[in-house]
Amino acid sequence: VTTMTELSPTAGKNSQDIQGDEKLSPRKVPSICSTRYGIAFIVHLCNFTIMAQNIIMNITMVAMVNSTNHQPSFNDSTEGLPVNSFGDPNNSPKSLPAGAPVYDWNPQIQGIIFSALNYGMILTLAPSGFLAGRVGTKRVVGAALLGSSLLVLFTPLAADFGLVLLIATRILQGMSLGLGYGGQFAIWERWSPPHERSRLCGIAVSGLLLGTCVAILLGGIISQTLGWPFVFYIFGGFGCLCFPLWCVLVYDDPVTHPRINIIEKEYIISSLAQQVSSTKQPLPIKAMIRSLPLWSMCVCCFSHQWLINIITIYAPTYISSVFNIDIRNSGFLSALPFIIAWVICLLGSYLADFLLTKNFRLVTVRKTVTVLGSLPSSTFLLVLPYVASNYIIAVSLLTLSCGLGMLSHPGVYINAFDIAPRHSSFLMGALRAFAQISAVLGPTVSGFLLSQDPEFGWRNVFFLTVVINTLGLIFYLIFGKADVQDWAKERKLTHL
C-alpha cells in the first residue's frame, strides 16, 4: 500500500499549516457522517462477528455434553443432560430438539476445548499487528474474518469426527481471531486524527462487547429451538456474509479510498503528516525491550485484563455458589454486564477526546480514564465478599465492575499510538498478546485458590485480583508516557 506521505500534497507543509488544516477541515466534514466513522462502524461489525464466534462454544457446551454416554450419540433420549444453559430458566431436557449430537466430555476435556482458542490467539496476536502494518489491515482482518467464519461452520462436523480434530479446529480458529484482534489497530495509524483516536477506536472495539451480548441472548434460544449445531451455522454464516461487505467498504488509508470526500482526506492526511512514515522503518526491538513506558503499558494491560477475565468468567459461578441462583439461566442477566460495558466503552472514548479538546495533556487523559476504569472496578470487587447476604447488591457490583472496567480502553490500551505512532500496529498486537496471557493464568490460579480454601476461596480470588490490578495501575501511573519516544522517531536510512 502506498503511504500517505508519499502521495499527499500536504506532506511537506510546516507544522503551522498542519495545525491550520486541523482547525478548519473538521467543521467542513460532519464527523459522524464521514468516511472515517463509516470505517469505524464496519470494524465494529467485524468485532461483533468475531467475538460472537469466540464465545458461542461457551454457550453451546451445556447442550453438547451428556455424561451418560461414552460415545457420540443423538439426543433422542436426553436423560441426564445438563440444563443450566444461557436460555430459558424453565429449560428442560425435552425442550431440546432431537437430532443434535451429544458427547461424553468430562470437565477436564471441556477445559481443554475452551483453552485451545486462547492458545491459538496468543500465537498470532503480536505477529498480526506487524503483518497488518506491512500488508494492510484490509487483507489481514479480512482473512481472519473469513477464516474464523469457515472454521465455525466446520465445528459441528469436527466434533463428530473426534476430539483431536475439534481441538485442532479451535486452535486454528483462535489463530484467526488473533489476526483479527491484533491486526485491526493498524488501520487507525492512517485513519484516525489524534484528537479523534479515542472515539474511533472506542466505536470499533465496542463491537466486541455487543457481540458478546447478542451471542449470550440468542445462543441459548437457538440451541433449544433448532439444536446447538445451528448456533455455529448461523454465526458462521453471518461472518461469511460480512466478509464481502468488509472487502468492498474498507480501505487501508484515505489515499486509496475511491469515495472519500476530498476535504476529509486532506484533513486526515495533514493531521497525521508528522506521524506516518514515508518509509518502512525497521522495528527497534532492543529499544522497545528497554522502554519503561512500554513495559508500564504491558503490565497495566495484563493486570487490567486479569480483572476483567475474573469478573466475566467467575461472576455466574460466584452467584450460583453463594446464593444458589444460576444467573446463566437468564439470558438477560448474563448479558447485562456486557450491555453496560458496551455503553460505557462508547461514552468513555468520547470522554477522552472531549478532555483533549479542553487542553488537558494527553498523558493526563490517558492516565485519568485508565484510573476510572481500574479503581472503581477493583473497589466493587473487594467489597463483594462482604455483601454476600444481598443478591441484588452483589449482582449490581459485578455488573458495574465489568462495565466501568471498559473506561480503560481509551486510556492504556491505545497508548501505543501516542508513544510510537510509526510502530503502533505491531505494539498494539503485542500488548493484546501480553494481556491475553492473563486469560490462561487467571482462571488457573483462581481455580487453585478455590479448591484449596472452600471457606475463604472467593475472598482470596477477589483480593488477589485487586492486588494485581492495583500494582499494574501504579506501575503505569509512575512510568507511563504519552509523548513520542526517541526510539520511535523516524530516522533517515543511509546507504553505504
Image (spheres, grey):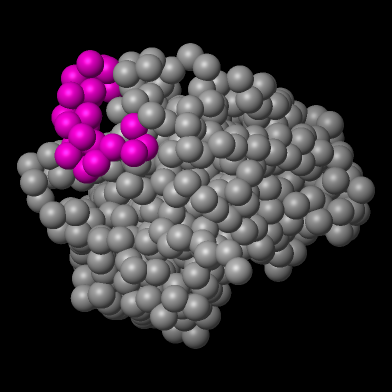
Residue 127 position by quadrant: bottom right
| Quadrant position of residue 225 | top right
> Is 325 on the left-hand or right-hand side of 353?
right
Q: Residue at x 53, y 34 (%)?
A: 252
**255 shown above or below 193:** above
The magenta stretch spans residue 285:
no
| Image quadrant in which the N terminus is located | top right
Whether residue 87 is visible here, answered yes or no, is no
Which quadrant: the C terminus? Answer: bottom right
Dividing the picture into quadrants, the one containing residue 151 is: top right
- In magenta stretch: residue 23: yes
Q: Which residues are magenta?
A: 10-32
Q: Does 437 appear above or below 77?
A: below
The residue most toward the bottom is 452
Q: Which residue, as the protein is rendered here, is positioned at the far front? A: 496
Residue 332 is situated, as x and y percent measured from the top left of the image, at: 41, 35
Task: Residue at 22%, 29% (x, y): give it.
Answer: 21
Work out whether residue 203 or residue 116 is closer to the camera in this orientation and state it. Answer: 203
Q: Is residue 234 above or below residue 76?
A: above
Residue 172 location (% of width, % of height): 75, 52
